[in-house]
Image (spheres, rainbow, N blue to C red):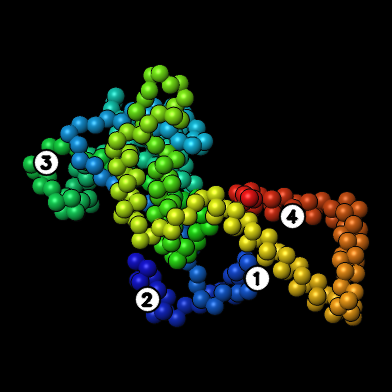
Amino acid sequence: MKERIYWLLDSFEMKAPNTKKDPDTGLAYDSPVEAINRVDFCIDFKTDKFEPNYKNLIGYKAKKASIHGKQNIDFSANVNGSLIETTTLGKLPNRQVTLYEKTREVRNKPVEKAYWWDIWGINPKTFNQQIWRVEARAGKSELKKGWNVTSFDDLEQKCGDIMADILEKYRYTIPDPNNINRNRWKNAPFWNTAIKATKEALAPYSSNAERKNILCGSWKEKRNIYLNNINGNSISLAALLDIEMTELPNVFDQLKKEMQQILDDPDESAHLYQKYLLAKERFVFLERN
């Protein structure tokens, strides 16, 4: 798919719009830049009979709700009579895991989904078992804010780390009646198998990156960018004001006076505060050491 995208861009000699700029450098891009919005990875299990219990699916800082599936909640389940067909924890564009019977979906769409029988190497006429799917999903916010992933290169370095982390944070567990702390319940064996299979399959696309480390690194990168911009602009301003390099600190004294004048003006101060709040919102996911 990546090769087809690049072939298409090259065939049409597409260029990036002049209004599209790199947020770190402020310079316009020369060519279109990809932005990964979502990545899914799934593991299929063959079983004689399985029905999930939505109470066994738990997640880090995930909220629970009724099984009827309302909007703006982290947990939902699709129910057919008394049978749970799909259970989901998490919410896109953040991270999410879902557990559902894939064979039911394939049989309900015999034309559109028939190719799955060939992928599995199964004869549907004689197959009387079930195939359940564990699917990890990383949305745009999880990729960009959690892992600093926007490009294909970013994704190919960290995809395995991302998917394994989702399956380790959102888990299907074995209830322990002697432990009221559900977060300490052990994983169901098939969930551990899913994590292991994910790490093995995506090993070429892993770099042992950690979500928190990426956030810290991103915070340092942003800080250094702004400091470099301030230093560079201060030097240019000193040259414009005909201030000698030895007197460069005077530039900051001048900036301090002008900033104080802005803060003393109610209208200007209110406008500046709104810009400050927007910046705080952008950086809310960035963690310091």
Write down the quadrant of residue 89 in the picture. Answer: top left
Q: Secondary structure at mark 3?
A: loop
Viewer-proximal residue, 273 or 176? 176
User: Where is residue 61 drawn, in percent x and y?
Assistant: 52, 36
Q: CA distance from mark 1 to mark 3?
A: 58 Å
Q: In this view of the protein, can residue 80 be seen by the observer? A: no
Where is mark 3, residue-wise?
A: 127
Position above or below: 225 against 194: below
Position above or below: 84 against 237: above
| Among numbered discs 1 and 3, the one appearing first in the sequence | 1
Q: CA distance from mark 4 to mark 2?
A: 40 Å
Q: CA distance from mark 3 to mark 2?
A: 41 Å
Please state if 224 lies on the left or on the right of 143 as rendered. right
| Among numbered discs 4 and 2, the one appearing first in the sequence | 2
Where is mark 4, residue-wise?
A: 275
Residue at figure coordinates x 20%, y 31% from the top left: 49
Residue at figure coordinates x 12%, y 45% from the top left: 124
**Numbered mark located on residue 7 in the image:** 2
| Among numbered discs 2 and 1, the one appearing first in the sequence | 2
Q: In this view of the protein, can residue 163 be seen by the observer? A: yes
| Among numbered discs 4 and 3, the one appearing first in the sequence | 3
Quarter holding the N terminus is bottom left
Q: CA distance from mark 4 to mark 1?
A: 18 Å
Where is mark 1, residue-wise?
A: 26
Q: CA distance from mark 2 to mark 1?
A: 28 Å
| Among numbered discs 4 and 1, the one appearing first in the sequence | 1
Q: CA distance from mark 4 to mark 3?
A: 61 Å
Q: Would you say the residues marked 1 and 3 are in contact, meaning their CB atoms lie under 8 Å apart?
A: no
Name the kind of residue labelled 4 in the image: Lys
